[in-house]
Image (cartoon, helix red, strand yellow):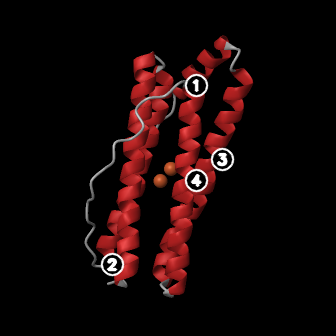
């Protein structure tokens, strides 16, 4: 068992990760429609990763004899102006998740819940990586905005991404 307040916060993050998966699938759909299948693949894998994050919370709650409770998903952003818009939305989303994780760490610390602190360590590192991924992609995209050829090469490269 965990303190009720911590259980609620962990359960919210379980649902936030599912929401992130939902949002990334919408981004994949944007690229599929545009015919950028590499980018679509990249975002579908990203969505699967977020689902795996959600399941880490699911299994942690279950292991602590708490019940994961599913909440309604919000409609994600479905309309984008261009690829850069998608990447910037992705970075903004990751920054939000980082704040949520930090708030969870603060709460677990206040409650002296060491097992939860240890569980959350992985997410702190993951968020650093996720933010870096999108920050680097935004930089690259801005650098190649005029170069259509290079953009296509990047699309081919993304097609190789595997889970
Ligand atoms: Fe995540
Ligand atoms: Fe993420």
Look at the image and tell me in which quarter the N terminus lies.
Answer: bottom left
Residue 95, numbered label: 4
Q: Which residue is mark 3?
A: 132
Task: Estimate the spatial distance between the alpha carbons at disc 1 and disc 4, rounded to whole Å.
Answer: 25 Å
* Residue holding disc 1: 157
- Quarter of the image holding residue 12? bottom left
Which is nearer the N-term, disc 1 or disc 4?
A: 4
Q: Residue 47, how many percent across, how many down?
A: 41, 42
State left or right for residue 91 relative to residue 111. Answer: right
In this orientation, does residue 159 appear? no
| Of labels 1 and 3, the one closer to you | 3
Number of residues whose C-alpha sits closer than 10 Å to that of mark 3, classed few (under 14), some (14–19) or many (20 or more): some
Q: Residue 64: which disc?
A: 2
Task: Determine the image quadrant of residue 122.
Answer: bottom right
Residue 42's disc number: none
Estimate the spatial distance between the alpha carbons at disc 2 and disc 4, rounded to whole Å. Answer: 28 Å
> Rounded to the nearest whole Å, what is the CA distance between mark 2 and mark 3?
32 Å
Disc 2 crowd, CA 10 A, few/some/many (<14, 14-19, 20+): few
Observer-nearest of 130 and 26: 26
């Amino acid at each position: 068992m965990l303190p009720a307040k911590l259980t609620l916060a962990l359960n919210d993050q379980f649902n936030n990760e599912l929401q992130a998966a939902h949002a990334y699938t919408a981004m994949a759909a944007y690229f599929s429609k545009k015919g950028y299948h590499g980018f679509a693949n990249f975002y579908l894998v990203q969505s699967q990763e977020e689902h795996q994050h959600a399941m880490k919370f699911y299994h942690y709650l279950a292991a602590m004899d708490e019940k994961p409770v599913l909440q309604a998903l919000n409609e994600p952003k479905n309309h984008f102006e261009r690829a850069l818009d998608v990447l910037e939305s992705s970075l903004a989303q990751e920054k939000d998740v980082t704040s949520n994780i930090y708030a969870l760490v603060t709460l677990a610390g206040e409650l002296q819940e060491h097992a939860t602190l240890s569980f959350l360590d992985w997410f702190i590192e993951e968020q650093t990586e996720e933010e870096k991924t999108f920050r680097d992609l935004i930089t690259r995209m801005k650098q190649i905005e005029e170069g259509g050829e290079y953009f296509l090469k990047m699309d081919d490269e993304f097609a190789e991404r595997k889970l």
